[in-house]
Image (tube, grey):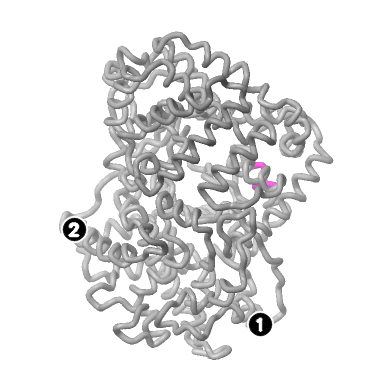
């Protein structure tokens, strides 16, 4: 329920790994890390560098049945998950005192994996709540129903939560925004090329309602779809949700309360939720709430009951018995992503724990058992090196005025860093997990999270808190804190290894570091100042020049169409594309300052610069199912992996020089189309 604005490096939702083996010779290890066997030398680097670097790997790799995509990220997450599975099994066997780390994790794991017990309970844990919804006799009694569902983390009608104020970043304020939908975003309800998905969605709803013993399931599914269609009508498109000038709309609570009357009593809702009445609400989408009013007024009671019934069932569909869980997977995993089989129950438990607040406990156990302090120190040195290069390049920009440069350098120097893990771990000892109560364990954690979030209203922002657990294969830039974060989970091969040569470490984790730095200066991050506030620090002329350069970069990505009528959206992906190009550029120049680069030593026929770019390209090796590719293009702010390689490289003169790419070739944009921003 908390609204956060976080830029995250793209990751796959499920991953598989190879074991990391350290060699005595750093050069031998580096050559192994640059996978020469993956190279397809029948393809010229000037024609398609992604396929040149990864072609043989792609030809020889099958996407596992339980996955929708497969690549380097998947491999490392699988390696981490193997370790986490051992940790959870050990916790289950050695739980210790109630409220202890092992007891919480062990009891949750035991309850999650006991499918026999879950099947015996069926959908009975939901029946009391379903009965309350079915007994609704008037649209005048929605406040209690909405508050009860919000308390469980189900964002029906709208979302409400406490978060950091974009203008006054030291304070937590109340945000109210769009609800969640059953389909990925509003476009899925309206675009003609998603009709088959809508048909499958209605069928999924009907079958799920029947499993939950709901009468007239087909009619209710149709009524629900009509309601969600109307609800989605005024929602922002995915690209619009990246624009803080659209999503930050302060209103006095009294004015907002009046705007919701007579159809919804906000004061009563907040009292039932257990939230304080705020002086001001940050409204994410004013037009959406105008639509909510008319929707409540014009919808039938049957449609509203259908909507709340489905919202409850859909939220818990993977937390009850196997029949409903498999049905849920068949739509969200199969239809939307192209998966052919579910992951192991152990992996599903790890994925769920990672998304819950107690994922922090899982991260702590991972760090305690598997994280190297030496890796943390080395990555910290690389951050320093990238910071030096970034500052130097900002000073040398020929398109930016001195006034804006001063602000940009001040912001760069103010960027904080979080490496490895939190220095302060959250205390979860008040949670009461039981090995025989999976549904209630999940619900208790969700309620714990909501109550904790609501208590943050009016309190100072906890700037020590991390936005993801330490075991994740990920990284992020947080614009409101102006900081970068690298969990322990990503500080491993193939992203980083102490025995890799510099070409590989800079081409991989170095690029990730530069990527996150650049998010502070992309199309969205550049709207936030050094203190993290949503404040303009640009001259008008410099901002115009910057936007011209970003639009030029967008022309590269708008031409990428992996499937007919399914292309990269340059507006949705702009921030990540800028960060990829900036990260690659900064990492290259940081590497160029090393003794290894300056030596010019050729290894296996490749110069230091060439090995850097190959290492970069092989980091993004990946294959997608057709369904996953379509979904990614419609929903993900990151471009697909092949374009995260070829897109930046087509705008990179250092790459042209390293591989002697002639003008006019596919991997070299025309000089007038080369986008150079940072």
Task: State whether residue 420 appears in this view.
Answer: no
Residue 670 % position (x, y): 26, 78
Secondary structure state at the residue bearing disc 1: helix
Q: How crowded is mark 1: few (under 14 residues within 10 Å), some or many (20 or more)?
A: some
Q: Name the image quarter holding residue 238.
A: top left
In the picture, measured across the screen, residue 428 lies left or right of residue 171, that is: right
How far apart are the two marked residues, 1 and 2, measured between alpha carbons? 48 Å
Q: How crowded is mark 2: few (under 14 residues within 10 Å), some or many (20 or more)?
A: few
Q: For the magenta stretch, what is the residue range?
A: 361-365
Residue 309 % position (x, y): 51, 23
Q: Which residue is drawn at 67% across and 28% down?
A: 439
Q: Residue at x 58, y 61 (%)?
A: 70
Question: Secondary structure of the magenta portion, mostly?
Answer: helix
- Observer-nearest residue: 224 or 674? 224
Task: State whether residue 118 appears in this view.
Answer: yes
In the picture, measured across the screen, residue 406 lies left or right of residue 8, that is: left
Residue 132 % position (x, y): 55, 13
Residue 390 % position (x, y): 38, 67
* Residue 104 sits above or below residue 552 on the image: above
Q: Which residue is drawn at 35% across and 74% down?
A: 650
Q: Is residue 589 magenta?
A: no
Q: Which disc number belongs to residue 544? A: 2
Residue behind mark 1:
28
* Residue 318 sits above or below residue 409 on the image: above
């Amino acid at each position: 329920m908390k609204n956060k604005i976080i830029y995250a490096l793209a990751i796959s939702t499920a991953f598989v790994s190879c074991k990391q083996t350290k060699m005595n010779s750093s050069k031998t290890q580096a050559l192994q890390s640059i996978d020469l066997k993956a190279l397809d030398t029948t393809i010229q680097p000037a024609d398609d560098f992604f396929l040149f670097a990864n072609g043989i790997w792609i030809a020889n790799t099958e996407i596992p049945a339980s996955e929708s995509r497969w690549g380097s990220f998947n491999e490392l997450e699988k390696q981490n998950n193997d370790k986490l599975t051992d940790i959870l099994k050990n916790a289950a066997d050695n739980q210790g005192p109630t409220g202890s780390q092992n007891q919480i994790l062990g009891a949750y794991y035991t309850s999650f994996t006991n499918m026999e017990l879950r099947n015996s309970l069926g959908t009975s844990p939901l029946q009391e709540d379903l009965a309350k919804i079915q007994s609704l006799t008037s649209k005048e009694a929605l406040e209690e129903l909405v508050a009860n569902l919000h308390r469980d983390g189900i964002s029906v009608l709208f979302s409400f939560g406490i978060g950091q104020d974009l203008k006054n970043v030291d304070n937590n304020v109340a945000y109210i925004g769009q609800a969640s939908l059953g389909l990925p975003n509003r476009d899925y309800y309206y675009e003609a090329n998603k009709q088959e998905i809508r048909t499958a969605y209605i069928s999924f709803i009907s079958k799920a309602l029947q499993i939950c013993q709901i009468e007239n399931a087909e009619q209710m599914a149709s009524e629900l779809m009509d309601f969600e269609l109307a609800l989605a009508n005024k929602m922002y498109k995915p690209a619009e949700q990246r624009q803080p000038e659209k999503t930050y709309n302060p209103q006095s609570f009294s004015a907002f309360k009046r705007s919701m009357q007579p159809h919804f009593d906000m004061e009563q809702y907040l009292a039932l939720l257990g939230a304080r009445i705020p002086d001001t609400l940050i409204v994410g989408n004013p037009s959406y709430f105008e639509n909510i009013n008319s929707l409540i007024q014009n919808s039938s009671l049957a449609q509203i009951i259908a909507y709340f019934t489905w919202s409850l069932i859909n939220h818990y569909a993977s937390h009850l018995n196997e029949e409903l869980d498999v049905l849920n997977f068949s739509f969200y995993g199969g239809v939307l992503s192209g998966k052919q089989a579910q992951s192991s129950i152990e992996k599903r438990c790890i994925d769920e724990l990672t998304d819950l607040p107690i994922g922090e406990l899982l991260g702590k156990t991972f760090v305690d058992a598997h994280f190297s302090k030496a890796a943390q120190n080395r990555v910290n040195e690389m951050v320093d090196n990238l910071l030096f290069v970034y500052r130097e390049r900002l000073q040398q920009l020929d398109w930016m005025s001195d006034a804006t440069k001063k602000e940009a350098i001040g912001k760069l120097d103010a960027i904080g860093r979080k490496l490895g893990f939190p220095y302060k771990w959250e205390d979860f000892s008040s949670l009461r997990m039981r090995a025989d109560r999976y549904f209630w364990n999940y619900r208790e954690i969700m309620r714990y999270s909501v109550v904790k979030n609501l208590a943050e209203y009016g309190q100072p922002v906890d700037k020590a808190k991390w936005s993801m657990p330490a075991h994740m294969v990920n990284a992020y830039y947080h614009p409101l804190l102006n900081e970068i974060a690298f969990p322990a989970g990503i500080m491993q091969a193939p992203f980083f290894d102490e025995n890799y040569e510099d070409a590989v470490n800079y081409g991989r984790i170095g690029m990730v570091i530069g990527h996150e730095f650049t998010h502070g200066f992309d199309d969205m991050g550049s709207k936030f100042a050094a203190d993290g506030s949503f404040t303009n620090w640009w001259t008008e002329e410099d901002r115009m020049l910057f936007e011209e350069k970003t639009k030029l970069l967008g022309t590269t990505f708008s031409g990428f169409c992996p499937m007919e009528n399914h292309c990269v959206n340059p507006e949705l992906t702009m921030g990540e594309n800028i960060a990829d190009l900036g990260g690659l550029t900064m990492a290259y120049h940081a590497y160029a300052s090393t003794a290894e680069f300056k030596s010019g030593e050729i290894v296996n026929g490749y110069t230091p610069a060439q090995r850097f770019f190959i290492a970069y390209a092989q980091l993004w090796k990946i294959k997608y199912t057709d369904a996953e590719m379509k979904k990614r293009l419609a929903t993900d702010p990151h471009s697909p992996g092949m374009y995260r390689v070829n897109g930046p490289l087509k705008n990179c003169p250092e790459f042209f020089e390293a591989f002697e790419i002639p003008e006019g070739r596919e991997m070299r944009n025309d000089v007038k189309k080369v986008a150079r921003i940072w």
